[in-house]
Structure formats: structure tokens, C-alpha cells
Amino acid sequence: MGGIDSPYVTLSCRIRMPAVGLGTWSLKGSAGIDAMLKALELGYRLLDTATYYRNEREVGEAVRQSGIPREEIFITTKIYPTEYGRPDEALEGSLDRLGLGYADMAMLHHPAADDLRAWGAIERAIAQGEARCGGLSCYSPSQARDFMARVKVRPQVVQNEIHPYFQDAASVRGLQDLGLAVQSWYPLGGRGHVRRILKDKTIVAIAQAHGVSPSQAVLRWELQRGIMVIPGSSDEKHLRENLDLFSFELSEDEMARMAALERGEKHGWA
Ligand SMILES: NC(=O)c1ccc[n+]([C@@H]2O[C@H](COP(=O)([O-])OP(=O)(O)OC[C@H]3O[C@@H](n4cnc5c(N)ncnc54)[C@H](OP(=O)(O)O)[C@@H]3O)[C@@H](O)[C@H]2O)c1
């Protein structure tokens, strides 16, 4: 996939998916619902959740309260490895908690021994209209290739850790070469690291050159690498700027300067 320069990406199954979404991992309870409602009001149309985040009820509630037609919002949820032994039940539980009729994307949260079996539940959900498509999270290109060789319905997206200090360029290319759309988790580096990354001199200089914030420079760089992003935030100013990524463009030189920031510094698990 080339760079992304519009708010939607068309997946190989022809489903349109927002290129920028809201990561909801930290959004829980009524404050979480308020943040998601604000995001939807500002124009976000993708909410990324998981059974592991324990906030699927809040996601469903925010979508219902927003008054936005269900079909205009893209919901991703994920089954956790501890659920791979009873994946149909796990997916039903997610759908019940969301209460939105269907999930747009059902993902496997991590590779694990039973992941092929768990994928069977996603295939059945797609066949029954309970999920529109499926994806993987935390898969390398070789894991994704092996996986795809053994399933009937191919995954559409791989969601992996990607940020300026963990760019994982070879994996991103490898996944894209397999025809998979790539989405970044921890697009700003993840909590505990974001402030340091957004103060990086190179990032600050590039942001200043475009009159945007450092977070916008980082997210735009990811989009130009063909990577979708799901930054998490509950701050209105941050929510607003993280969505405003299509009015400026990093030059080849700026993309190269961003690439030079790679440190192989993984901030999440596995
Ligand atoms: N698949 C997986 O295994 C996996 C693993 C981890 C995460 N995820 C997904 O990825 C999403 C994103 O991860 P994350 O939220 O932990 O990390 P992140 O998006 O890299 O960073 C979020 C942090 O950045 C701050 N922030 C956001 N926008 C900002 C801005 N414009 N300026 C300054 N600070 C800003 C937020 O604080 P404020 O609230 O103050 O804005 C928050 O502390 C999660 O919600 C989840 O959906 C998936």
C-alpha cells in the first residue's frame, strides 16, 4: 500500500475503513463514554476496543448516544488468547456487550497456540453477518503468511506496535506485501513515552515547519508510510488535532529524517 492521503482506506475485501480512529484502551466508565462521544462529535468514525479493555459496553453506549447511524461508525474488537479455547462464546460476549448488532472488524489480539481455532469463530461470525471482516494483532509477516495459508477467509488488517522509536520497517513492508493493511497501536509511542517522543528535536522541528503539533507530525508520517493509526486520548484539543492530518504533507527529506529516529525501542508486549 502507498501512503494514505484520505480519511478512508479500502481494504482488499472492498470494505472502507477509517484511516484514523480512536484507541479506547484507557477509556472506561462515564468519563470514557464522554471522551468517545466527544471524539464522535469531532468526526472520529472508528473506535478500537477489545474484550481485554473491559470497555465494550461503554463503546456501545457512546455509539448509541451519539445519534450517528450505526453503519457510519467502524467498530473493531478483539478476542484475547485466554478466550481462544471458546472463541464463539467470546465473540458472542463482545457482541452482547457492544449491543450494536455486529462488529466491523473482529481481531485476534495475539498469536497463540489456538489462534487458528479462534479464527474459525471469526469466519463463522462473518458468514452470519455478525462481523464484517477479520484482522490480526501482534503478528509478524512470517506468522501472518503461515496463518493465511491455513485459513479460508483471509485477515484484512494487522495491528502492530509502530511509532517513531519502533518503526519496524521490514515488518510493515512484509505485511503490506502480503496485501494486508497495517494499523499502528501506540502510534504516539504509548503512555509513559509519549511526552519524550513529542519533545524529540527532529519531530518538533518538522512539526514547526508545517505549523502543526508534534503529534500531528508523527501521525502524518505514519499515514504517509501507508499505516493507519488509532491514537488514544481523552483530551479535546488532542482529539481534535489527531484527526486533522490531511492538510499538510511531509517532504521526502522529512520522511527520511523521521526514519532515522528508529531505535528498535519496543514499548509494549511481545
Ligand atoms: N493490539 C494491541 O495489542 C494493542 C496494544 C496496545 C494498544 N492498543 C490500541 O492502541 C491504542 C493507542 O494506544 P495508547 O492510547 O496506549 O497509546 P498512544 O496512542 O501512543 O498514546 C496515548 C497517550 O498520548 C497522549 N496523547 C494523545 N494525543 C496527544 C496529543 N495530540 N498531544 C499530546 N499527547 C497526546 C494521551 O494523553 P491525553 O489523553 O492527555 O491526550 C495518552 O497519554 C489503544 O487505545 C488501543 O486501542 C492495541
Image (cartoon, grey):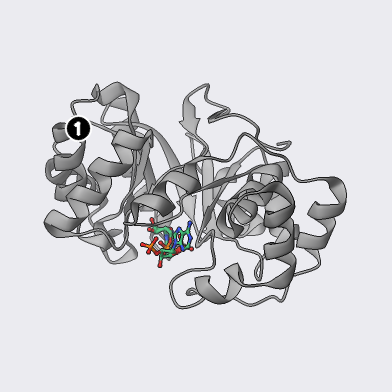
Quadrant containing ligand 1: bottom left
Disc 1 packing (10 Å; few <14; some 14–19; many ≥20)? some
Kindly identify the residue that appears in the image at 35 percent across and 36 percent down.
42
Q: Position of residue 76 (x, y in %)?
A: 35, 43
Q: Visible in this render: residue 265?
A: yes
Residue 47 versus residue 262 in the image, above or below:
above
Kindly identify the residue that appears in the image at 61 percent across and 63 percent down.
163
Q: Position of residue 63 (x, y in %)?
A: 21, 35
Give the quadrant of the N terminus: top right
**Pick the front one: 114 or 74:** 74
Please name the residue that numbered disc 1 is placed on.
Answer: 66
Q: Visible in this render: residue 124?
A: no
Kindly identify the residue that appears in the image at 65 percent across and 69 percent down.
166
Look at the numbered disc 1 and say if its residue's Cβ is closer than 8 Å to ligand 1. no
Residue 3, picture quadrant: top right
**Pick the front one: 192 or 213:** 213
Residue 21 versus residue 169 in the image, above or below:
above
Q: How many marks?
A: 1
Q: Position of residue 206 (x, y in %)?
A: 73, 57
Residue 26, picture quadrant: bottom left
For the view shown, which residue lies furthest in the right direction? 253
